Image: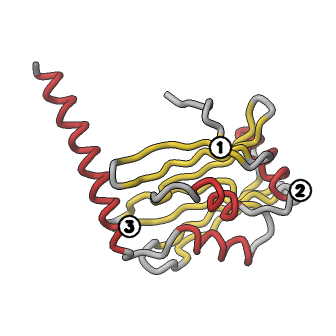
Amino acid sequence: MRLWLLGFMLVSGVATAAQSMYSMFAGGDYVPPLSVMQQIEKGFSGVIAEFNMEEQEGELVYQFELINPLANSITRFEYRARDGKLLKQKASKVSADDLGEVEATRLIAAKDQTFSGLIAKATKDHKAFLTEAKLDHDLGISYLELKLLDDTGKFKLAFDVENLRPLPLLKWD
């Protein structure tokens, strides 16, 4: 009984947190992530490979990874969501763990596309807010994994980068 009650409390807490985040997004008290992505894409060489957000000291912060495959580098950015102000920027070399993302960024660059443009295409039929996005390349497919939040809760999508279509068969645990 105790485990069931604990499980119920955890699920309720997650649902409440998602609804709270949805209310914040719906209120418009932040700079949309796509706007910040477009700013990065205009100001830096490379392709954004990852976006997520987290709360730091009571503020929502956007985190981005930009990969420049030609320079073999990754630049990490943190922006304050409330006003889009750059908080941190750090560059490093690409590691072996990043090879799937590098492969996907090469494809995007070769097709003259942008991360923000792919997200816009992948989410055009969804009235939801983006909470995470990540490029990857696996089993010969370059894809964008998205986590979205709507008024019913969180959900995931996968989008084929090369063929510009949803990947309905890709599932996660």
Viewport quadrant of the N terminus: top left
Q: Which residue is mark 3?
A: 25
- Cα separation, mark 3 vs mark 1, equals 24 Å
Q: Which residue is mark 2?
A: 110
- Asked which secondary structure carries label 2, the reply is helix
- Asked which secondary structure carries label 1, the reply is strand
> Which dot marks residue 128?
none
Return the x and y of residue 118 as percentages of the image width and height: 69, 58
Residue 23 figure quarter: bottom left
Residue 24 figure quarter: bottom left
Return the x and y of residue 2 as percentages of the image width and height: 11, 22
Task: Tell me which amino acid carries mark 1.
Answer: Pro
Q: Which residue is mark 1?
A: 166
State the residue in front, 163 or 148.
163
Q: Residue at x 58, y 74 (%)?
A: 35
State the residue in front, 95 or 64.
64
Q: Residues within 10 Å of mark 3 (few under 14, many from 20)?
A: some
Residue 47 figure quarter: bottom right
Classify residue 173 as left or right of residue 91: left
Tell me which numbered mark, 2 or 3, is placed earlier along the sequence: 3
Q: Residue at x 86, y 57 (%)?
A: 111
